[in-house]
Amino acid sequence: MGMDWILLVAMVALLGFMFWSSRRRAARMKAEQEAKARAMLPGVKVLLQGGLYGTLVAYDGEDLSKAAVVELAPGMEVEVHSQAILRVVDEEEGTVTEDELIEAEAAQAEYTADVANGAVTSLSDDRAAKKVAETSSEKTDSGDTKPQA
């Protein structure tokens, strides 16, 4: 009889955990959908399920049965199902600021100057120097007729 109680308690605990996790997942999904709806403003760049990027022209976050209008190219607007929009694309992601560009150019100029004056060598330069050294040592070895001690 004790084993039956243990199984019953385990079943109730398992059902409680399943209920709790499903409600938590549903709340998280609802929050993600609300965040997506807030970000879906005309003019933002979006990614569609087909892998196409476009600019959102019209979107009704309240009535998802209405089609969204996305501009794929200047003057080329298409209607898509509102749920075909995967996400809003962050245009700042992957872009380089002017300060970063100036810093990178300065670093490149410094590296080029160091290579020119011999302060820095690359692996390919090291390999080339090694081959030259090996080639010159082979020439002296083959031209030398004296036995080495």
Image (tube, rainbow, N blue to C red):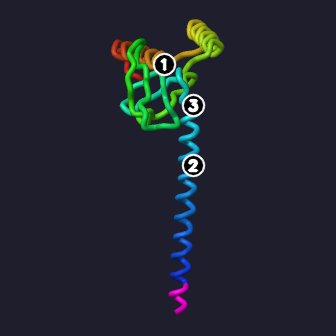
Left-right relation of 48 to 5: left
Mark 2 residue element: helix
Q: The residue under label 3 is which amino acid type?
A: Ala
Left-right relation of 135 to 63: left
Give the residue at x 43% y 23%.
70
Which is closer to the viewer, label 1 or label 3? 3
Give neighbour class at mark 3: few <14, some 14-19, many 20+ (Cα, 10 Å).
Answer: some
Residue 89, numbered label:
none
Which is closer to the viewer, label 2 or label 1? 2
Mark 3 residue element: helix
Give the residue number, with chain letter if any, for mark 1: 126
Give neighbour class at mark 1: few <14, some 14-19, many 20+ (Cα, 10 Å).
Answer: few
Q: Is residue 119 visible?
A: no
Give the residue at x 51% y 87%.
4
Give the residue number, with chain letter if any, for mark 3: 39
- Work out whether residue 60 or residue 97 is closer to the camera in this orientation and state it: 60
Give the residue at x 45% y 35%.
86
- Work out whether residue 126 or residue 63 is closer to the camera in this orientation and state it: 63
- The answer to whether marks 3 and 2 mark residues whose Cβ atoms lie closer than 8 Å is no
Give the residue number, with chain letter if any, for mark 2: 28
Vertical order, 122 against 48 (above or below): above
Q: Earlier in the sequence, mark 2 or mark 1?
A: 2
Q: The residue under label 2 is which amino acid type?
A: Arg
| Residue 104 falls in image quadrant | top right
- The answer to whether marks 2 and 1 mark residues whose Cβ atoms lie closer than 8 Å is no
Could you say where residue 142 lies in the image, as x and y percent from the top left?
Answer: 34, 15
